[in-house]
Amino acid sequence: MLQRIGNGDEQAFRRLFQYYSPRLNQFAYSIVKVKEAAAEIVDDVFIRFWKQREKATAISNIRVYLYVAVKNGALNYLSSKAHRQITEPFNHIDIALSRDQAPDEKMMSAELLNKITAAVESLPPRCKMIFKLVREDGLRYQDVAEILHLSINTVDAQMVIAVKRISEKVQPHFTAFPKKQLKK
């Protein structure tokens, strides 16, 4: 696809935009907290990408490239709007999870889904950001490490913390129901 975009194929570019823009918009919004600004940041990334399309074939991982570009655009937006230097990126961010439901989630009880959502929302911001990128956006640990400029070990450690905290908060839901006796 990148080869086709590099050759000026607008249809391939549209497909790339349609595939990535919803997640990138959500990612940008989680940082800037202004929907219009998030959409503008993502649009700007794609406009710059299209203008430099001849370099597309040199990109080894388009997903990481786009997430990093959006993250940088969002942080630039925040620094220009706030007129301050961000020294602890992601520690002040409140991440909103997507409410898109997969078929298996629809089968969960509303109570369990609410407990899981509350558990994720209670994670520390950086931990929640990493959890969202891995579990919701489907990024690999390596990709998340590149996007956030962290080591893979840090991403792994944050995922362990996230899973542990979520399971601790959700565990009472499962122990509240008596186990069925198996008949021999």
Image: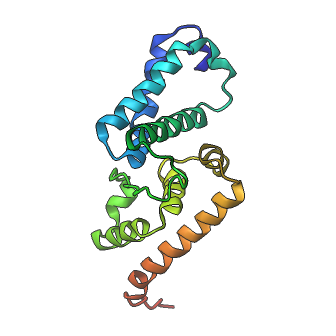
What residue is at 60 percent from the left and 43 percent from the top? 147
What residue is at 61 percent from the left and 11 percent from the top? 54
Q: Residue furthest front?
A: 83
Tell me residue 134's x, y (percent). Answer: 55, 53
Tell me residue 128's x, y (percent). Answer: 48, 60
What residue is at 36 percent from the left and 51 percent from the top? 98
Q: How many marks?
A: 0
Foreground residue among 183 and 89: 89
* Quadrant placement of the N terminus: top right
The figure's colour scheme reads rainbow
Task: Indicate the quadrant where residue 154 lies.
Answer: bottom right
Above or below 134: residue 12: above
What residue is at 59 percent from the left and 33 percent from the top? 65
Foreground residue among 108 and 145: 145
Above or below 39: residue 33: below
Tell me residue 20's x, y (percent). Answer: 46, 33
Tell me residue 88's x, y (percent). Answer: 54, 55
Task: Indicate the quadrant where residue 109 lies.
Answer: bottom left
Foreground residue among 98 and 107: 98
